[in-house]
Image (cartoon, helix red, strand yellow):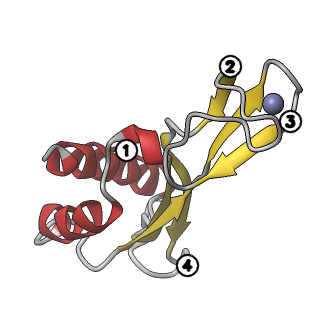
Amino acid sequence: MHEFSVASSIARQLTEVARQHHRKLLGGTVAIGPMSTVVPELLSEAWKYVIKDTELDGATLHIEQVPIRARCRECDAVTEGHDPFVRCRACDSMNLQIESGFELQITGAELADDTENASPAR
Ligand SMILES: [Zn+2]
């Protein structure tokens, strides 16, 4: 289970974003593909644990599950699914080019209004 290290890494990056803007982080969004080997439920749990008693405490992690997308090298059809698959939906070929599904990236950060916790130096 490596969700804890993933959650820590996400927390570190979002802490950076919040500090750069002198705002408190309210939430962040990560896109996760089925082949990233991260289990969304476990990541949610790990996130709560990782941010506890830090400056991110209370921030929500939104997990966006990206489907696997594969283009068929035989017929050019695109097959999508949340569960791993090996065959083209159109022609049953196994000659597929994976276009997405390995994602594990931060796609958004939600920051509090400037008024709260803002840097007094500005
Ligand atoms: Zn095909």
* Cα distance in 3D space between marks 2 and 4: 50 Å
Picture coordinates of residue 100 (x, y %)? 62, 36
Give the labeled residue for mark 4.
Answer: 113
In the depicted structure, whether residue 64 falls above or below residue 5 = below
* Cα distance in 3D space between marks 1 and 4: 19 Å
* CB of mark 4 near ligand 1 (< 8 Å): no
Side of 121 relative to 98 (left or right): left
Q: Which is nearer the eye, 59 or 68?
A: 68
Q: Which mark is residue 95?
A: 2
Q: Which is nearer the eye, 73 or 17?
A: 73
Give the labeled residue for mark 1.
Answer: 13
Residue displayed at 53% across by 68% down: 110
The type of residue carrying mark 4 is Asp
Please name which of the two marks, 2 or 1, marks the residue nearer to the observer: 2
In the depicted structure, whether residue 72 falls above or below residue 45 = above
Side of 55 relative to 20 (left or right): left
* Cα distance in 3D space between marks 2 and 1: 37 Å
Q: Give the mark, 1 or 4, whose residue is nearer the N terminus.
A: 1
Give the labeled residue for mark 3.
Answer: 77
